Structures are given as C-alpha cells and as structure tokens.
Amino acid sequence: MSRLFSILILSLFFVVSCQENPNATSENEDNTDNVISPDYYFGIDRNLFEVKEEKIKRGDTFGKILEAQGIDYPQVYAILQAIKGEIDVRKLTLGKPYSLFYAKADSVLSTPEYFVYHPDVSGYSVIHLKDSLYGQFIQKSVRLVEMEAKGVIENSLYETLNENGINEALTFYLSDVYAWTIDFFRLQKGDRFKVIYTEKFVDDTVSIGIDRIKAAYFEHNNKPLYAFEFISDPQKGIVDYFDDEANSLRRTFLQGPLKFNRVSSRYNLKRRIAYYGNRIRPHKGTDFAAAVGTPILATANGTVVKSSYTKGNGNYVTIKHNNTYSTQYLHMKKQNVKVGQYVSQGDIIGWVGMTGNTSGPHVCYRFWKNGKQVDPFKQKLPEAKPISNDLKAQYTEHIYPYKYKLDCISFENEENSEVVVVDNPQQNAKTSS
C-alpha cells in the first residue's frame, strides 16, 4: 500500500512539472520580461510621453498653436530660427493632423516637448521644442511593388478599374501611354487590356500612387497594340513607349488638347445654324467639351506666338510648331503661357472656360497646315522616330520577358478585372531605376 502511495505521489509530481514552463525563471532570478520595449511613434518612444492628437483649425498658425500650449513668443521665435531652412511651418493645411508630445516625467502636463506635423502618409515633420531646438522632415521609405492588371471594358476604363478594386489612377497612366493611338472616350464594349506596372507603398500597405507602366497590351476594336517602356536616348535619359516591332507609339501631335477628348462639334465647312436662319456658317475648328478648369494641353512641341483675347475667341493661345503646322486653342478661362515661350507636347497651356462667343464650356481646337485651316482628324500626321538600329537588339532583349508575361495573362472566361502582385522588390523608390 505504501509503495502504491509513493507511485501516485511521484506521478503527480511529474504531471505538475510538465505543466510548468521549463524556461521560467524563479522569483529570485532576474526577469528580463519586465523590461518595457520601446513604442516608437514618429520616431519618439511613446512610453515616455503623453500624446495629444489635433488637427489644423481655421486661423491656426504654428506660433498660435505653441502659444496656446503655454510657450511664449520669445521661445517660439527661437524655435523658428532653429528650424529655419529645414521645415517651413507656414504651410500648414486646414484639417491636417499634428501630434503634441508631453513628457510623462512632468508631474503636470505643462508645455509639449515635440510638435509632429503629419499631413499625409509619405512623411512627417518633427520639431523639438525644448533645450536643443531642432526640426527635421522624415521621408518614409517607399517600396515598389510590381503589379499586373487585366480587364474587359463594359462602360469605361475608369469604371472597369474602380468596380474591381484597381487603383483608378492607372486610367491616366494608360491614357498617357496610348494618347497618340487610342481615343479613350471612344472605347468599345469588349475592348480589353493587360498591364504590368509598379505602385508605390509606404508602411507596406498604404499606396501613395502609381510609379509607372512597364508594359501594356490594349485591344481596341479588335486591334491589338503592345506598349513597352524603353530608354530611347541613353545620353539624355529620354524614356518612351514602343510597340512589339520597335515603332514609337508617339505621334507628332496628340489626338486632342485634353487628357480625355470628347468631341462636341467637328470641323465642318457646310455647317448650318438655325440661330442664323439655317444659313451655312463654316466651323473650322473642333470643339472638345469639358468642365471649366480642365487643363488644356499643347498637342505638340512649339513656340507660343499669341496669348491674347478677342471678343470672338475669348482667351486664346496660338502655337507655331514648325513651318508647316500651327494650332490654336480658344475660349480659355485663363492662359498659362506667354508669347515667345517654348512648350513641349502635353504641357498645360491654359484651362477650359467660357470666354468669347460660346454657349458652354469647351475648347475650340484649330489646326493649320501650310497656312490653311484643316480638319486635324483627316491629316496623315508624321510619326515619331523609331528606335535607332543601334538599340534594336537591346530593345528586343529588354521586352522579351515583359511580352512573355503579358501573353501569359489570359482573358479566357473573364468578365471582370483582376490584379495580381508579381513581385515585391524591397527597395526605396529613390534608388529604383
């Protein structure tokens, strides 16, 4: 009986021992688990501070905020002098957040030790308000993520992306790539696309925008068109897009002067207007409807020869591109260029308005060839130069993996868009090519 009792006691001892943590320290041993780990918030250990979150209110200035916190003007002036050239606290935006850090060592929260302004996710400004005064802007590291997107158009490219959770900004990047070859206001149901692009992220999950498109495929009216990014002039660092046969997608002229061109009235020499008794009133321009304030773009490189106002034209700009071609842009709300200024294709030269003789907001785009106004849509305009023969072999090698990736993205049985993360290169955007 005594032997059985001993066995039971020994078994109970082992059961209790197995439930104990073999790595646990005794009460007499040092317990490093009691050490509080730093809790960094904007690079400042929150364990040492009480943090108060605020937003910029109407009428707030940096000085007014600090004075409300008990910091008198001489100290505010000293702080401003210390951070001069590092942080411009005059640019505080209404509604944007800032944080005040008060030292916990103080028996009563008196004046803050740090002021942190963080208007967006890309970075923040830290200002030390006591003792050694300083200020610095901290740019958050950016991670580039290579993505794939594909889709079939039902209504518009923007809606297709938006309805399927893809960054809508991709619309504008694709419109830039195909600005000379596809009219995005004339997309057809069933048109489809594939694109490989990089997107910028901070804090691993927060997107701060598209970086660039590396390769794309757009099928419009059953006509496929590849686009590959390539440095066409290594010495000048010029980057452009070319198709799978090394032809440039760029044309000498854009299809129209707006980012998205919606023609409301075409060039028509036999136009009749009821207001004028149904008489023929030739329309030698092409009207593009858009909201007031929409940027108007130069359709080609050239020099501004007129930036003026007349009763009929309203605010207008005329650009001479060469001895053959000139263009004019009418009814602007305001011009953005001066006579004699050289502009590049895509530069903003003004904004859509309703000045002059017009019944609604639009830009009237006029096009001259050899001194005669013509319909720009009926001109066979010259294309940009293709890739030089010296770079063709390099281009073919460069696009091979991207074309392979695009061709591997299937449209079979697809009704909606889809995004796939291809690669997550752990690199800062500043060091990325």
Image (spheres, helix red, strand yellow):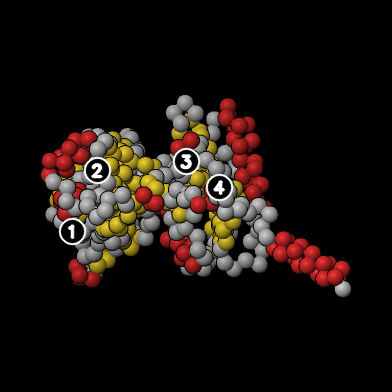
The mark nearer the N terminus, 4 or 1, is 4
Residue that protrudes farthest toward the bottom in the picture? 1
Query: Dot 2 lies on which element?
Result: loop
* Left or right of 67 on screen, residue 416: right
Callout 4, which amino acid?
Answer: Asp
- Distance of label 4 from label 1 (alpha carbons): 54 Å
Residue 324 percent across, percent down from the top left:
34, 37
Mark 4 Cα shell of 10 Å, populated few (<14), some (14-19), many (≥20): few
Q: Nearer the viewer, mark 1 or mark 3?
A: 1
Callout 3, which amino acid?
Answer: Ala
In the rendered image, the vertical position of residue 143 relative to residue 398, given as above or below:
below
Callout 2, which amino acid?
Answer: Leu
| Residue where numbered disc 2 is placed | 129
| Residue where numbered disc 4 is placed | 30
Residue at left offset 20%, top offset 45%:
90
Query: Dot 1 lies on which element?
Result: loop
* Left or right of 350 on screen, residue 234: right
